[in-house]
Structures are given as structure tokens and as C-alpha cells.
Amino acid sequence: MSNHLTNLTLKVWRQSGPNAGGHFESYRIDSISDEASFLEMLDVLNEKLIGDGREAVVFDHDCREGICGTCSLMIDGQAHGPQRGTATCQLHMRKFQSNQEIVIEPWRATAFPIVKDLMVDRSAFDRIVEAGGFITAPTGGAPDANLIPIAKPVADASMDAAECIGCGACVAACPNGAANLFTSAKVAHLNLLPQGQAERWSRVEAMVETMDEHFGSCTNHGECEAACPKSISIDFIALMNKDYRKSKFKNRKLIDQI
Amino acid sequence: MVELNAKIPAGDIAEKWDNYKSDMKLVNPNNKRKFKVIVVGSGLAGASAAATLAELGYQVDVFTFHDSPRRAHSIAAQGGINAAKNYHGDGDSVHRLFYDTIKGGDFRAREGNVHRLAQVSVNIIDQMVAQGVPFAREYGGLLDNRSFGGAQVSRTFYARGQTGQQLLLGAYQQLARQIGLGNVRLFNRTELVDTVVIDGRCAGIVVRDLVTGEIASHAAHATVLCTGGYGNVFFLSTNAMQCNVTAAWRAHRQGAAFANPCYTQIHPTCIPQADDTQSKLTLMSESLRNDGRVWVPKNADETRSADQIPEEDRDYYLERLYPSFGNLAPRDISSRAAKRAVDSGRGVGPLKNGVYLDFSAAINRLGKSVVQERYGNLFEMYERIAGENPYDVPMRIYPATHYTMGGLWVDYELMTTVPGLYAAGEANFSDHGANRLGASALMQGLADGYFVLPYTIGNYLAPMLNKATPGVDHPEFKAAETGARARYQQYLDIKGTRSPDWFHRELGKIIWDYCGMERTEQGLEKALSELPPLYEEFQKDLRVTGDGASINQTLEKAGRVDDFFQLGMLMCKDALERNESCGGHFRSEYQDEEGEAQRDDENFAHVAAWEWTGDPMNATRHAEELEFETIHLAKRSYK
């Protein structure tokens, strides 16, 4: 049954642009239904701000079903807030209490510069995928889909990795701002499949090295897995590291591999 | 004056597409780089079209208002994708998929387009597997299938409950490869604000950089809109928050006819609205109805909790009304039945705005572990949103807007009534008639982008080789830029008292009440009398805070709501003029004694394509007659 939370204080990061200085502003939410999602609470705040003639808080969001990966937010210092395996858009106010102060910040990572307020630029992720996160299969010439049987456990493991929604929580949660969980999920999704074998070694090399241009280094804290709204396993990082090491031999001229 | 020539190729239905491909004009591989194609939108249709066109050698520019092409709402599709592979030897064929789609659409789609869709469906699965989409497999390693509504065969391929995500990532990866190679230029956080037509051809688009607010023009030989559907006109829908009609509507205002706007699909199993602050509804997969039983209390004054209500006081209304299909009755029929149950005062939940979807019988019969295996993810998602555990208490569900079958009118080549301007995916009206079958949206988006547009665009471009086309310094582009700047400045200058969201909510209420699940002449007249004054108020009393020179989501929303108002009027007009019930368009006046939809094939076996006249309340209606040469018109019955 619906209850209301009262007297919430939101401390929200406001920053007018990438190069401007930022600061916290405090806002009061007098009353909100515990059925409301966290982002609906921000919608209510924004309606109130517009009513007062002030500029609405900018934040990224879209599907509100936890699948598009657009939403972000550090909530009380935790990427996507206190509920495990849950993106901010699926977090509901029943996880909070009346009279609480909630600190809301953007993703914190050098590779994700702030665009405005709580919105950041995650295009470095796209650069990693562009470097090799694909199988070269131009439209038109694909063989019949059942030609290559794929063992169910292999397809399932690939799918476990492919569930990544590209939100960036792993980077935001990492003390080093590393993108190893994101990159390894994409590498594993394709490197596990038979279709991905032809480009296995060039893929991992290109993606890891592009990742290193933008992000910090992984030191196995494991914060990424804990913050991931899809609970993607850090085992994939081990797989990526193994493949990356091997690629340094495999990517030499073919003669070396015989 | 709009001319509707569908350009269906000659020949037997099964040979039309081959005949087209044999006769179409080609562009030499070395000449393709001389042509520029703009693709707006990066969902399944947009990403697949852009990637394929770039692979062929065209210069491609892609525009998306998202931060990354991977965010488009195709990503949220859960169930699966249809294809006539007949991998299970259960009698599927291209013809059967073609027939099911025409029938599912209540005989309001074009035969030629739908047959082609069924034909290329098999190529889509091959293509997506080659790209690494991890579809569900059987233990032997072959692809698994499941069945979906409106079909008697198992032809739905799936990747857990995230088929849309996996297909979109596949298309996005292919697009990313072309971006990395420099064959595609990506403009992210950039929104289309106008299309430009010069000498009767689409010359390009005008866009707004959402980060800087700058307005700029882009010229191209051809422009493709893959900008999705308009379900957010209802305010509350299962669409993503940013889904909007602006690109399609701006094209409509430049001369592209808008077809069948009243064909909207209401999905029966969504989580009901919990309070007034709610901004979006969430779909629960239709597959839940395989084991869940739908019911409401018999008595409107019922106060007991669900588990305390004995069997004799429950009304399993779907099982009662549709004994043969029961809880698996088609989407439109289940939705209307739920509405009637709630309207009779027997709704459940704190707001009495839902019906129960009860798994207790299934848990008793199969055991909790089997139910958990089948629906575990969905039950978790439900609990996260509704705060109730569906293993212990029945789910509460209610219908919500989900998909729009109407859209920009296109011919067989997916070209709108403006030469050089194409529409693909949900943005066009082409393949689903008055009702879309489950697992067919993903199929259509990818069919258009991978296997149709890359052929048909060449046929248009070939004769344009080495001919001069207007550049962005042409006065028409400059005029469109000036108009767009003025439009966004205007929203800022009104300085009224109400936010864009407030108007959107009010608009949505009118559309939902009078142009939702059930429509009547009286209700539609009422909507058409209430919309213009509300729109006028919007134009006088809108308040947009902030400025136009940095990212301003309130300003973006204002532009989208403005276009939704105009579309809303056209929707109601279209629904009013279509004096029949078909698929998602149910007019209460036209039903049989059992409450089923009654089509009027004599007078309405046509597509209604609306021409912009400057005022959506006075748009001109044109009709494209639908000819059924292969399939006989029949009453759509699932009994």
C-alpha cells in the first residue's frame, strides 16, 4: 500500500557546463509517495523548480526499465544507489526513509566529463566498441543460422556478458576509474562465440588499448561488479586479461603461430 | 496535392520482390561514394540501414538525440523476433507468416509489403547470428524457438527476456565498426528540428545540437527517418521518456502524408499506475499469461485481500468470455475486457485501477521452482517496481499504450510522398495494418534497414549521378534554420506559468480517455473540442526556464509536446472518420453482439493518408485502396 515519505533533503550537484565550477544545492521534498521511482522524485523536484522559475536539474534517463543504460547518478556515494543489481531508474523511494538527506552526484570519472549538472559524456565507451567490439559480417552474405551449432553453456556465458547495458556504473564505482568490466563484457560476449574467433586476438588487443587511452587501470578492487546493475561478473576481466596476453603472441605474423 | 502511388511491382505475390530487384537501377560501387545519405535515429531500423549503406560505399551521416546510438528504445523489446525458418518442422513457411501478419493486422496492411517482410525474415536471423547475437539455444546447439500470440507455429527467436537489447547491440556494433572506419559520421545528442524540401525533393535536414543549442543544416541526396513511434502522445505509455513524433511530424508538415494515425496498440499486461507523479508505465511480458489467471472480484464493494476472496466470489472474466483462448486471448481483446472490468468498479489495488494476474494455481500445479524458472526475472522486476512479491500476492496489471502502427505513409520502396525522404521501422505505417503481432516489430525494423532500404535507395539515387543538388547555403535551408531558431526562442519567450510536462499530462489524459482503448463518435468530438483550447493555452502559458545555449531538457520537451498536440488532433480526426472497428481501433458503435470488432470492408478497406494543410484540425484525407489478391478478406476470429 502506498505510504508517503516526508521531509527529504536532496543535496544535488549543479554545474552549468563542462568547464564551469560546480557546487551542491539543497532542495526539500515535502512529501513523496513510496511508490515513486527515484527519477520520478527528480521529476517532481524539476516541476517544482520550474514552478519557482528556476532551471530544472539536468540528468540522463530514457527507458526507465533498467535496460537502455542511459540513467546514472551517484546516490549517497553509491553508483545507482543502495539496491543491488538495480539501475537508478528502477530504484524506488520505498528504499529511503522520511527526514533523510540524499546526496546526488554525477558519475565521477575523468573519462566521463560532466556535460551539465548530473549529465556526463560517456562517449569513450563508444570509442572502445568502435575499435573492435564487433564481428565483421557485412549485410548480405551470412550463412544459415543453424550451420554452426553453439553449445548451450557457451551461448549462455556469452549472453551473461552481453547483458551489459553500458551505463558506466563500473567506471564510476572504481577507485581508479577503470573500464575493465565494461570492456571485458564486450570482449567476452564476442570472443566466446565461434563466430567471434576469426577476430578474437585483434579484437581484444584493439579494445584493451583503446580502453587504456581513456580510462584508469584495474587493480582488482571488485567495486565494479558490486555496482553493476546487471551483476556482470569480474571473471570476464580475467578472461580478457588472458586473451590480451595471448594476443601479443597471436597477433604477430602468421609464421610465428605455426 | 499528395499522390499515393504504392508502386507495387507486377507479378505473383511471391515474385514481386525478386522482380523489383531484377528491374531496379543500380549505382556502380565506385560511384556510391558520391552520394550522401542521412539516417535519423539509431534504433534497429536506423543502425542497420546506416551500417549497410556505409558498407555498400555511400557516405552516411547518422543523427541521434541520445548520447550513444545504443540507447534507442528498440533495446527494451523483451519477447523475441519472428522468422519463417521452420526450424522446428511445424509447418511454418513464408506464406504462413505473411498470412498471419495480414490477418493479425485485421486486413488493413498492404499485401506486397507484408509478403516481402516475411520473405526477408529468414535472412535477418542468419545476419544477426553471424554478427554474434547470442540467441537462446537448445542443448544440441541449434537455435531455440517459442510461440507467440496470433500464430500456430513456433517461429519466435529470443535472447532471454532481452531480445531487443541483443539485436540492437548487434546492429549498433555493426554501425560502430563503420564509424570506426570513418564511413559513417555520428552526430549524437543532436535532434532533427526540420526537413527541407527543394524543387519537390528532400534536400536534407535542420538539426539542433542539444548540448550547445546551435541550429545547423545538413544536405544529402536522400534522407531516412527511423525515428520510432508516437505512443508518448498518451503521456503514460511503455515508450521510453524521450520517444517523440517530432521528426515524423516535421516531415509531415513538409509534405509527407501521415497514414492511419488512429492505429495504436494497447498492451494488456502492464503494471498499473501507482500515483499521480508517475511518468511512465512498465510492460510485463505477454508470456506471463501462459500460466497466470486473470480475475477481478465479482463484487464492486469487495474489501478483502486477494487470498481471502473465495473462488465463488471471483470472476475469471477472460476464461468466462473466451473459453477456448481463455487467458491467452489476443492483445486488443484482453485489453478491452480489463478496461470493462475496471470501469464496472471491480478494479483491484489501492487505486482500483488494475486486474489480478494470479499465479497461485500455477504454483500449486507446477511447484514454485518451475514458476521461478519460467518467470523469475519478470517476478523480480515486478517486485522492484510494485513492492509486492508475486509468489505470495497476485500481480496487478492494466493495459497501456505500447506501439503505434500508424506513421508516415510510404510506398513499396519505403519512400514517403516526398521524393528522397524515406521512413523505416515504427516510424512508417507499412506492415502491421491495424494491429501488430507480438515479436514482429523487431522483424520489421531490421527488414527495412538491412534488406529493403539498401536496395530501394539505389534505385532513387542512380539517375541523380553527377547532377548538382542544393547545398546548405541554399535559401530554403537558411529559411528553415531561421524558422527553427525562432521556434525554440518562442518557447523561452512565452514565460507563462505551466511546464511542458503539465501540458503533456493534460494532453495525454484527453487522448487516453477519448482515443484510447475504446472510441466513440461523441467522445472523439469532445476530444476535438477540448484539444484546440488546450493547445492555445500551451502557446500562451508555457513556461520554459533556463536558456537555449546549453543543454535544456525542458526546452527539448516543449518542442516535442508542441508536435504531440498537433498529432493528437490528427489522431482523433482519423479515429472519427474511420467508421468501423479494426485491430487496435475499436469504435464502440461498430461491434457485433459478442462485443467483437466489426470491420466495414466495403467502405474502409483502405489506408487513410493525411495531407498537411497548415492546420491539423483541417488536414486533407486521402485514401489508398487496399487490394487483396492473395488472401481473402475474412472475419478475424481467434475463437
Image: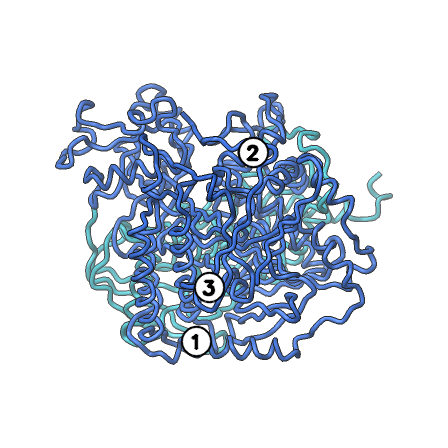
In what element is the residue under mark 1? Answer: loop
| Residue B27 appears left or right of B454 | right
Q: Which residue is at the front of the view, B277 or A154?
A: B277
Q: Can you see residue A226?
A: no
| Residue B364 appears left or right of B602 | left
The C terminus of chain B lies in quadrant: top left
Type of the residue with mark 3: Arg
Mark 1 sits on what residue? Answer: A16
| Disc 2 residue crowd, few under 14, some 14–19, many 20+, Cα 10 Å | many
Residue mark closest to the camera, 3 vs 1: 1
Picture coordinates of residue B210 (x, y %)? 50, 70
* Residue at 21%, 60% in the rendered image: A31
Residue B157 lies in quadrant? top right
Residue mark closest to the camera, 2 vs 1: 2
Mark 3 sits on what residue? Answer: A108
Q: Colour of chain A?
A: cyan
Image: B482 above or below B537: below
Residue mark closest to the camera, 2 vs 3: 2
Q: Residue furthest right?
A: A255
Picture coordinates of residue B63 (x, y %)? 59, 63
Type of the residue with mark 2: Phe
Q: Chain of mark 1?
A: A
| Disc 1 residue crowd, few under 14, some 14–19, many 20+, Cα 10 Å | some
Picture coordinates of residue B360 (x, y %)? 29, 26
Mark 2 sits on what residue? Answer: B157
| Disc 3 residue crowd, few under 14, some 14–19, many 20+, Cα 10 Å | many
Image: B626 above or below B232: above
Q: Colour of chain B?
A: blue
In what element is the residue under mark 2? Answer: strand
